[in-house]
Image: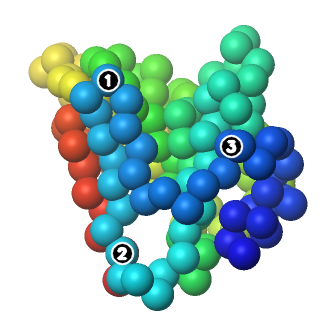
Amino acid sequence: MCCTDLKEELGGSIECYSNSNVASENGKQFRIEKPNNVELCKVQIDGCLIQNQAVDKCDYLFKICQSNQIFLVELKGTDVIHAVNQITSTYDQIRNKIDEPPINYKGFIISSSVPRAAEQNFRKQQEKVLKQKGFLIKKGHQKHVEKIN
């Protein structure tokens, strides 16, 4: 039901939607740990929901249906600043379709490594997004588990 409702809001092909709680790519993984009674929907954004290669977009969107939380996930090598841009661009593109307050959104960048010099730039971008868009982007390394109650 959750994915059906989300598909009505976002459109796209049914193949872009699943009930999976895991996104993985090139050794990086984002997983949602949740109770059995919590329903979620995973949407493949890059190359499925948004096929335009000229547009910045993140890899996946997860919707936690009971709480209406939206997770925007980018599985990335080392360019976390570009990942921030991909997440904010996706947010801007879907925000008018999914009518949830910014506080319900959260971005996740799962990277293989982040050069020390890039860490400070990431923090500045993180603060900028929080101030301008109203949602937080977190960064994880290699494999990240987000626990939902």
Image quarter hosting the N terminus: bottom right
The residue positioned 36% from the left and 62% from the top of the image is: 32
- Dot placed on the residue nearer the N-terminal end, 2 or 3: 3
Name the residue beneath numbered marker 3: 16
Badge 2 vs badge 3, beta-carbon distance below 8 Å: no
Amino acid at circle 1? Asn
Q: Secondary structure at mark 3?
A: helix
Q: Residue furthest left?
A: 116
For residue 8, which quarter of the picture? bottom right
Amino acid at circle 2? Lys
For residue 143, which quarter of the picture? top left
Q: Is residue 111 left or right of residue 43?
A: left
Local crowd size for mark 3, using a 10 Å CA cut-off: few (<14), some (14–19), many (≥20): some
Local crowd size for mark 2, using a 10 Å CA cut-off: few (<14), some (14–19), many (≥20): some
User: Could you give the CA–CA distance between mark 1 and mark 3, rounded to whole angstroms?
Assistant: 19 Å
Q: Is residue 40 left or right of residue 114?
A: right
Instruction: Work out whether residue 73 or residue 95 is closer to the camera in this orientation and state it.
Output: 73
Instruction: Say whether residue 91 is visible.
Output: no
Name the residue beneath numbered marker 2: 34
Amino acid at circle 3? Cys
The residue positioned 46% from the left and 48% from the top of the image is: 107
The residue positioned 46% from the left and 87% from the top of the image is: 37
- Image height of 111 relative to 23, above or below: above
Q: Is residue 117 left or right of residue 40?
A: left
Q: Where is residue 121? Give x, y as percent.
A: 31, 25
Badge 1 vs badge 3, beta-carbon distance below 8 Å: no
- Image height of 60 relative to 85, above or below: below
User: Could you give the CA–CA distance between mark 2 and mark 3, rounded to whole angstroms?
Assistant: 21 Å
Name the residue beneath numbered marker 1: 26
Local crowd size for mark 1, using a 10 Å CA cut-off: few (<14), some (14–19), many (≥20): few
Q: Secondary structure at mark 1?
A: loop
